[in-house]
Image: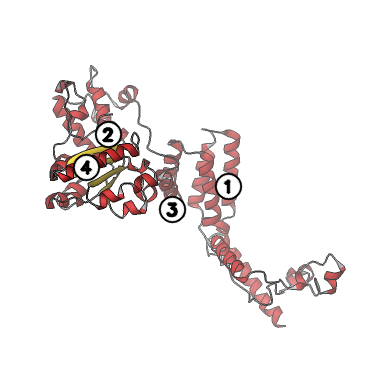
Amino acid sequence: MADLFAPAAPSTVAPTAAPLADRLRPHSLADVVGQEHLTGPEGAIGRMVAAGRLSSMILWGPPGTGKTTISRLLADAVGLRFASVSAVFSGVADLKKIFAEAREHARMGTRTLLFVDEIHRFNRAQQDGFLPYVEDGTVILVGATTENPSFELNAALLSRAQVLILNRLDTAALDTLLARGEAVEERPLPLTPPARAALIASADGDGRFLLNQAETLFSVDLAEPLDPAGLASLLHRRVAVYDKDREGHYNLISALHKSLRGSDPQAALYYLARMLTAGEEPLYVLRRLVRFASEDVGLADPQALVQCLAAKDAYDFLGSPEGELAIVQACLYLATAPKSNAAYSAQKAAFRSARETGSLMPPKSILNAPTRLMKDVGYGKGYAYDHDADDAFSGADYWPEEMTAQNFYRPSPRGFEAKIAERIAYWDRLRRERQSD
């Protein structure tokens, strides 16, 4: 696929026959749209270019946002030789050849900017191979990645390169690209204003994709401008960018969880829809909802867990797409339920205490005595059977003798837990009274 912004390579193809994206390649950093926070006078790249000195960097951003373009323009802006390699198609032998050539040019006084596309696809050992050449200045490394560098690049490489984040192209930037395409073609796109807006939205922030779609529209003869429905029938709709084992997966489930916790059913439903329409496994979403029901709602509304498990059963029974409505119902129930993390906090506190106290013996009075020996040593002796006591409550002490009573579970004043808090307070008062008798 043609690079949206890279400088034109020598070609025998007539200029008018070149792809639209090829004809719209920027000739300077000022022409790059949507990344002014980096390329502008106050941006990190703008400042480096103004000073005439580049440091190694990792360009992190979605597809079609200008990573390759910026790297080529950087080399031109500061007079560096440009070399590029793709981690998809290259190996150790290719890198060794590039480094040898860079050293030879360095001896002649020309430094090299090495652009590594999809650098995250190199394994850890291969990434380590860049370190000596970056450290001794043989190359200025500019890596491009669509994945979070914190997860995909090793710490040694990250410590030697500045991570710069490229923005997903917004509506204004994408509209600018379309206007440039129309200027080159010397005619407007055959679209109504709503269809033009739909075309921009379909690009999902990817300028390269947008220009390819625009080129298709320029290539067809239409009697009248297309409306959104006509556009949809002519062009395939872009699939949402979402990799189920990558950062997008974790970002969206985090956004869903936080929206539920913040009791925003509209936002929660949006992120749920983002995941399901992008192909997320519905049972994964259901597992996360079940977890949320216990972690963030708990006994403030005991029906939350019941709703989620019922949604899982309904989805198992109906499948997609009918069963997805049950997932939506569970999502909305959780978002609108009273919130409490008291059970979750109690679990962590109790588990921590159990690890710290080790194997303390419970009181013998509350231990069963299935053998004569156990009875002889006091197991079960003096046990107070609660149902025989007033209010079916004995007030006995159930804690190990070496340990004072703990207070792990502190109910919130919300939902059903408010009633639970009243019950606990009632039992605590009776316990104090009966243990003091």
Q: Nearer the viewer, mark 3 or mark 4?
A: 4
Q: Which residue is mark 4?
A: 102
Q: Nearer the viewer, mark 2 or mark 1?
A: 2
Dot 1: few (<14), some (14–19), or many (≥20) neighbours within 10 Å?
many
Residue at left offset 50%, top offset 38%: 281
Percent x, y of residue 317:
61, 35
**CA separation, marks 2 and 3?**
29 Å
- Chain-order first, disc 4 or disc 2: 4
Q: What residue type is disc 4 on? A: Ala
Above or below: residue 359 compared with residue 415 = below
**CA separation, marks 4 and 2?**
41 Å
Q: Identify the mark at residue 84; answer none if there is no mark.
A: none
Residue at left offset 70%, top offset 79%: 435
Residue at left offset 53%, top offset 65%: 413
- Chain-order first, disc 1 or disc 3: 3
Q: In terms of depth relative to the viewer, which is nearer, 83 or 347?
A: 83
Q: Which residue is mark 1?
A: 307
Q: What residue type is disc 1 on? A: Gln
Q: Which residue is mark 3?
A: 258
Residue at left offset 33%, top offset 35%: 90
